[in-house]
Amino acid sequence: MSARRVFTLRERSRIPPAAALLAYGAMLPFPIAFVIALTSTFLAGAAVLGAQLWGAALLLFFAGVRRGLSFRTPGGATAPQFATFAALFCAGFLALLLPAFWALPLILVALLAMAVADTAAARRVETPLYFERLRPPQIAVAVAGLGGLTALFWLA
């Protein structure tokens, strides 16, 4: 017996308030860590380590989200879906192993790449439509903090 499922998806490009709250809330630790590292020599190391671990965890989480979304793709995961999943997973795993000097810029670049990939994926109907509008400003919050932390390391 062959099972078949057909469903119709209706989405709006409007970002749901709960999604916005979670998305931006997840990025706030990066600018907070930057401000702490900038203003407290006593807490700077903990702030940097926290940002590194948080960034690695986010990348691994986003990899899982992308892989999960690909399970709903008719015919199986597309090459861009699998490549995005694999890249995010590898970046997250490496960010756990590398010293912060290298891990922070890796997280920064991976999040920027994810913003580009998710925007394109929304146009291909592989992610929610609102990702096209959500990801760029959401990732900008992370970039502000990670960019500042990276600059502190690289310019010190």
Image (cartoon, rainbow, N blue to C red):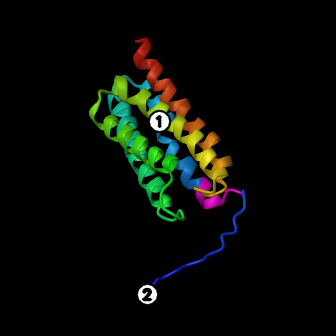
- In this orientation, which residue lies closer to the viewer: 48 or 83? 83
Q: Amino acid at mark 2?
A: Met
Residue 18: say if magenta. Answer: yes
- In this orientation, which residue lies closer to the viewer: 73 or 115? 73
**Residue marked by disc 2:** 1
**Residue marked by disc 1:** 110
Question: Looking at the rendering, in which quadrant would you find the C terminus?
Answer: top left
Indicate which disc, 1 or 2, sits on the residue closer to the N terminus: 2
The percent coordinates of residue 37 (x first, y second) are 42, 26
Q: Which residues are magenta?
A: 14-20
- The answer to whether residue 128 is above or below residue 49 is below
Q: Amino acid at mark 1?
A: Ala
- The answer to whether residue 156 is above or below residue 128 is above
Provide the secondary structure element on which disc 1 rests: helix
The percent coordinates of residue 99 (x first, y second) are 29, 27
Question: What's the residue at 60%, 60% (across, down)?
Answer: 18
User: From where the camera sits, is residue 35 visible?
Assistant: no
